[in-house]
């Protein structure tokens, strides 16, 4: 058999159902093999970054390994930004790129480059297959490494001659791997002891809680100890129900502001994340003075990497949370249970007060023109079915999105990690493939959308009924806010303009762009029209773009 058959059969043995890609000449062996493997669909994108972003979100939404096919050095280069985001998100992926015939490597062939070196900084492992005999073992290892905690992308370069070589070394399946170790009993007892001694515990939850389907167990622990729950500032999934009385929202992006958010805590429990991803430097660490730190992680690599916890545990997140909750339940006396109940009641009252304050904010902004962000998000929510899945790249509208939607479980919400923009429109393709029976909507800022607008064509080409909502404020609003922060932090003049941060002259026409890629579109400029436009887009059963003209920076 030829190397290309080993490659395709390796994908089959690892349960791969989709390859996301943008083909080129060196990918001819893979493309020419597809008709022989009808169980694997090729999802074609017009840009390599879109293909990689879609695969990353698909991996997040399914738990399966995303597989990507890129085109030599320029194609890999086009995808590196999304590859960085996938690494930050912990998306299990096998990323491939065709490589020129190895017999030409001393001739400096067209499109040739050291692909392994290009991919290495943003992957867990980067390798080139040098002969067909290596493909079976190499791909088995690639899938293993991609899925070992913390999960992430690996890269495999596939020279065209290697794919066409004959080999007797067959594809190798993954076997049944039992990665989850039981939590250390002494460690569980130590964590429980610290929690039982705490009088004001706080939890910060990461994506691994959602990936391990451990949200219910986190809820149970939070309620038992009476702790508020924060989530990471940038998150790929929903780790804690947004409407729960203990939910406090996302932590900020510098140590001092995080410390202020956690103020009063005498114990901070970190569960399943990199903790913390900061944007601005601030002196000190993010924990209140004197607070104990406890960390639960799925990998040794993350445990105590950035901070020194008083106690730390490694294991599968659902096992860790269950074991800690059981130990706290067994050790809690009447006084502790009463104090935890009082903390829970106080959190419920604070949640209700926050909700009332937000309702007042929405009412105040209800009739503003152009459409206010609170009104836009409220109307979008009203126009969507209750079971809609949201892919979020709303950027500065994120706070209003989080208040407008009561996300209750993993699978309701996806977003990008790493801070690179353009992930929403690309990622929603993979999310829709993962959730074919649920309505799926991407909510994106206009600046972000332009990084991966080609995703509209892929949605039309593969008949994916996605609603693309573009919040068009004609500016890079987040950059204006960040420039304000920069000026304040570094003592710069605050009365300067915002150079090169307006998306005008000419204005972007998203409905026209959508039409050119086979997607129907609707432009909304009046707040009363938002709800109906969203509902009609969902009802169409086809990909549809809704551009909403919203207010800019105030």
Image: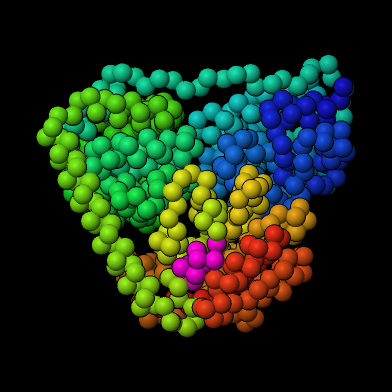
Q: Examine the rendered structure and indicate whether residue 78 appears above or below residue 130.
A: below
The answer to whether residue 391 of the structure is visible from this angle is no
Tell me residue 528's x, y (percent): 52, 78
**Would you say 536 lies left or right of 381 here?**
right
The quarter of the picture where residue 533 lies is bottom right
Instruction: Report the coloring of the rendering.
Output: rainbow
Q: Quadrant of residue 165?
A: top right
| Residue 323, magenta (yes or no) | no
Q: How many marks?
A: 0
Question: Do we see residue 237 in this rendering?
Answer: yes
Residue at image position (82%, 36%) is: 38
The residue drawn where x is 87% and y is 29% is 164
Q: Residue furthest top?
A: 168
Name which quarter of the figure residue 293 lies in. Answer: top left
Q: Is residue 252 placed above or below 206 in the rendered structure?
A: below
- Which residue corresponds to the image point at 49% horizontal and 81% vertical from the top-left? 370
Prevailing SS of the magenta stretch: helix
For this rendering, which residue is in front, 252 or 35? 35
Looking at the rendered image, the quarter that the N terminus falls into is: top right
Query: Percent position (x, y) of residue 549?
Result: 55, 77
Residue 219 x, y percent position in the rendering = 34, 40
Q: Position of residue 367 (x, y in %)?
A: 43, 82
- Residue 383, magenta (yes or no): yes
Classify the position of the C terminus by image quarter.
bottom left
At x 26%, y 25%, the residue is 327
Stretch of the chain drawn in magenta: 376-384
Please state which of residues 379 and 232 is positioned toward the viewer in this rendering.
Answer: 379
Determine whether, in the image, residue 230 is placed left or right of residue 548.
left
Give the side of residue 3 with respect to residue 284, left or right.
right
């Amino acid at each position: 058999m030829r190397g290309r058959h080993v490659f395709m059969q390796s994908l089959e043995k690892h349960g791969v159902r989709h390859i996301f890609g943008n083909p080129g000449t060196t990918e001819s062996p893979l493309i020419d093999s597809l008709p022989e493997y009808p169980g694997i669909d090729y999802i074609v994108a017009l840009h390599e970054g879109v293909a990689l972003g879609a695969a990353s979100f698909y991996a997040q939404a399914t738990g399966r390994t995303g597989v990507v096919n890129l085109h030599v050095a320029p194609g890999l280069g086009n995808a590196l930004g999304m590859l960085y985001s996938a690494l930050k998100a912990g998306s299990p992926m096998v990323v491939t790129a065709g490589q020129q015939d190895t017999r030409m490597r001393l001739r400096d062939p067209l499109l040739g480059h050291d692909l392994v070196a290009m991919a290495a900084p943003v992957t867990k492992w980067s390798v080139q297959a040098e002969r067909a005999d290596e493909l079976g073992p190499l791909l088995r290892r690639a899938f293993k490494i991609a899925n070992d905690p913390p999960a992430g992308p690996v890269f495999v370069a596939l020279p065209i001659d290697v794919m066409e070589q004959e080999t007797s070394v067959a594809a190798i399946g993954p076997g049944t791997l039992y990665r989850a170790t039981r939590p250390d009993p002494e460690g569980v007892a130590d964590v429980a002891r610290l929690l039982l001694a705490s009088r004001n515990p706080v939890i910060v939850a990461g994506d691994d809680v959602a990936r391990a389907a451990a949200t219910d167990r986190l809820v149970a622990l939070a309620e038992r100890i009476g702790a508020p729950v924060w989530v990471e500032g940038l998150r790929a999934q929903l780790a804690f129900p947004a409407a729960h009385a203990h939910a406090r929202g996302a932590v900020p992006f510098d140590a001092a502001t995080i410390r202020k958010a956690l103020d009063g805590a005498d114990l901070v429990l970190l569960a399943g994340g990199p903790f913390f991803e900061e944007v601005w430097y601030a002196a000190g660490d993010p924990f209140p003075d004197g607070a104990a730190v406890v960390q639960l992680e799925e990998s040794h690599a993350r445990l105590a990497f950035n901070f020194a916890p008083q106690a730390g545990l490694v294991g599968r997140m659902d096992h860790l949370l269950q074991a800690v909750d059981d130990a706290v339940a067994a050790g809690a006396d009447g006084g502790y249970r009463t104090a935890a109940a009082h903390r829970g009641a106080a959190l419920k009252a604070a949640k209700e007060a926050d909700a009332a304050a937000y309702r007042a904010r929405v009412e105040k902004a209800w009739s503003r023109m152009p459409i206010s962000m609170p009104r836009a998000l409220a109307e979008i929510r009203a126009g969507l079915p209750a079971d809609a899945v949201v892919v979020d790249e709303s950027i500065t509208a994120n706070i209003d999105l989080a208040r407008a939607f009561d996300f209750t479980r993993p699978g309701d919400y996806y977003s990008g990690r790493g801070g690179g923009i353009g992930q929403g429109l690309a990622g929603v393709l993979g999310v829709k493939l993962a959730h074919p029976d649920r309505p799926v909507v991407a909510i994106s800022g206009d600046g972000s959308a332009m990084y991966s607008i080609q995703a509209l064509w892929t949605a039309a080409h593969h008949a994916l009924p996605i609603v693309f909502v573009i919040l068009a404020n004609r500016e890079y609003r987040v950059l204006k806010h960040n420039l304000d922060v920069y000026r304040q932090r570094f003592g710069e003049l605050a009365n300067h303009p915002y150079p090169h941060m307006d998306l005008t002259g000419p204005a972007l026409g998203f409905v026209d762009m959508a039409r050119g890629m086979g997607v129907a579109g609707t432009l909304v400029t009046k707040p009363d029209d938002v709800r109906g436009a969203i509902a009609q887009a969902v009802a169409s059963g086809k990909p549809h773009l809704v551009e909403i003209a919203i207010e800019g920076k105030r």
